Image (cartoon, grey):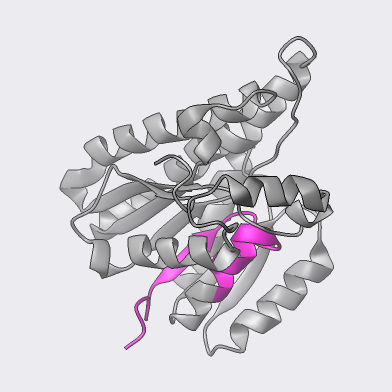
Amino acid sequence: MKLLENKTALITGATRGIGKGIAQMYAKQGANVAFTYSSSVDAANALEEELKGYGVKAKGYQSNAAKFDAAQELAAAVLKEFGTIDILINNAGITKDNLLMRISETDFDDVIEINLKSVFNLTKAVIRPMMKQRSGSIINMSSVVGLKGNAGQANYAASKSGIIGFSKSVALELGSRNIRSNVVAPGFIETEMTAKLDTATVEGWRAGIPLKRGGSPEDIANACVFLGSDMSSYITGQTLSVDGGMLT
């Protein structure tokens, strides 16, 4: 029995890195997958075909979740196409790193809007159908940086910490409707983005992690499978750090 059989998941920012890993793992576990992307049409089409290869329904949507109306339209389109939204994974995010002395107002606003406001927008868009079906799992992607801060990432840390507070509040509001809201906080995950870093930097990161390695998108995806499945039916309002022990 696949853990996510007959469930439909909406995953934002899924054409690369962690989002792509989650989409692939969800399809392998039997979930129908609706996913969003911002600009990479070819990558979205390729992912759609790959996911369908696992015998599930899959569809990509070009959408900017940072815009309230776009999030509403997206949820309506997914409901029309798939009939239900059982799991929402708010994964889309950006970084615009700089020291506070040098960070511009635009760089602060953009990161808050895309990383944090998008979580509000999409959660707001799916809670009515979830309340109607009296079930749902919302999984929001934070970061180790949202738990401990990081020099040069005040905007990113603020957005990722905000996600934790928001998720806990949603868990308290919607628990009586059997809607769960949890957070995954990845540590140093090795993706296309980290591949651009120099080897010495990456080795330095790995050396400081108790498990002595970076994580993979699959490590995050496994946590999301657990939180999306009925195995975690009594877990809500929690933050699951998937960081190899970085914050231990």
Q: Which residue is drawn at 33% across and 47% down?
A: 181
Q: Which residue is drawn at 25% across and 68% down?
A: 231
Q: In this rendering, is residue 40 above or below 54?
A: above
Q: Can residue 81 be seen in this view?
A: no
**Region of the chain picked out in magenta, as a range:** 1-24
Q: In this rendering, is residue 168 above or below 208?
A: above
Q: Nearer the viewer, residue 104 or 130?
A: 104
The furthest residue to the front: 207
169 lies left or right of 17: left
Is residue 199 covered in magenta? no
Q: In which quarter of the image is residue 201?
A: top right
Is residue 18 covered in magenta? yes
Q: Where does the image place residue 235, in percent across and percent down from the top left?
A: 23, 53
Quadrant, the N terminus = bottom left
Q: Quadrant of residue 86?
A: bottom left
Q: Which residue is drawn at 18% across and 56% down?
A: 234
Q: Is residue 40 visible?
A: yes
